Image (cartoon, grey):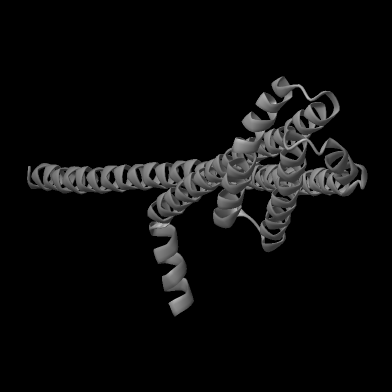
């Protein structure tokens, strides 16, 4: 026989082992796909939590800037020291809040996001300087000079730009959040599709194994029946030979009588 026939014979005889190896490999691939899907989902959740926390801190620093401005203008308009309490409260927390966001973006942020938060900090420093100067002038009795500084709308333009930059940074975080969710969904869809195909392959291999085992059992049964028939024929031939020998002996005895 040719090498090809030898190979096909070997392949048929070892098909059960080969099928088991293939099924084991498929199960391992399914486990890898499942782990990848879980990891993508975990990363999406982590990104979602980080983005949501960052957007919350962005809103807080915007609120601190507005409260500081409100306290400053309330004091300048009314000369009421009660307005300085929210100003002092917000002033002491505004820059530290911006710095916390900047530290987070240093670890997990783009170059553009780090530039945005740096610009926001510069604007907050300029706004605080304007507020401190106007409050100092009002306390010194030069309220008109303080009002003129506020009236030139420099402080308002700083706050408007600060809010615009904060909204831009929040939009970037929202886009990153959507991208992470879309990536996780794509991996899950691909994993689901591949798992279906792998499951189909396992079922086909299992069906092939069942058919192969049935054919092997039928072949073994036919071989066993053939052996039994051969043994029965040999035994029948032996009995016939013995009977023929005895009949010949009987005829010999009769002839001799």
Depth check, front residue: 147 or 249: 147
Residue name at image x 58 percent, y 53 percent: 108
Depth check, front residue: 233 or 15: 15
Count of labels shown?
A: 0
Figure check: 209 above or below 113? above
Judged left or right of residue 171, residue 104 is: left
Residue name at image x 81 percent, y 39 percent: 142
* Quarter of the figure that contains the C terminus: top left
Judged left or right of residue 190, residue 18 is: left
Depth check, front residue: 38 or 197: 38
Judged left or right of residue 100, residue 121 is: right
Residue pushed farthest bottom? 2
Depth check, front residue: 35 or 42: 42
Q: How far across and how far down the image is residue 86, in percent?
A: 68, 26
Residue name at image x 70 percent, y 20 percent: 82
Figure check: 56 above or below 227? above
* Quarter of the figure that contains the N terminus: bottom left
Residue pushed farthest front? 141
Q: How far across and how far down the image is residue 39, in percent?
A: 53, 45
Q: Quadrant of residue 243?
A: top left
């Amino acid at each position: 026989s040719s090498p090809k026939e030898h190979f096909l014979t070997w392949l048929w005889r070892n098909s059960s082992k080969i099928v088991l190896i293939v099924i084991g490999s498929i199960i391992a691939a399914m486990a890898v796909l499942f782990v990848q899907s879980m990891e993508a989902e975990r990363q999406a959740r982590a990104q979602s939590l980080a983005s949501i926390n960052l957007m919350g801190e962005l809103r807080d620093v915007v609120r601190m800037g507005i409260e500081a401005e409100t306290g400053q203008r309330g004091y300048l308009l009314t000369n009421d020291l009660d307005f300085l309490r929210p100003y002092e409260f917000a002033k002491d927390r505004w820059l530290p809040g911006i710095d916390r966001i900047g530290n987070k973006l240093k670890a997990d942020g783009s170059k553009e996001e780090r530039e945005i938060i740096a610009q926001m900090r510069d604007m907050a420093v300029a706004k605080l300087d304007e507020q401190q100067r106007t409050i100092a002038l009002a306390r010194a009795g030069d309220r008109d000079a303080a009002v003129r500084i506020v009236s030139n709308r420099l402080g308002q333009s700083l706050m408007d730009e600060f809010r615009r930059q904060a909204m831009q940074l929040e939009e970037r975080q929202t886009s990153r959040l959507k991208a992470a969710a879309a990536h996780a969904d794509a991996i899950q869809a691909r994993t689901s599709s591949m798992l279906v195909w792998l499951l189909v392959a396992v079922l086909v291999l299992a069906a092939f194994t069942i058919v192969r085992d049935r054919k092997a059992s039928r072949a073994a049964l036919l071989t066993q029946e053939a052996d039994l028939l051969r043994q029965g024929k040999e035994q029948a031939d032996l009995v016939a030979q013995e009977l023929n020998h005895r009949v010949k002996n009987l005829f010999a005895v009769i002839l001799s009588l």
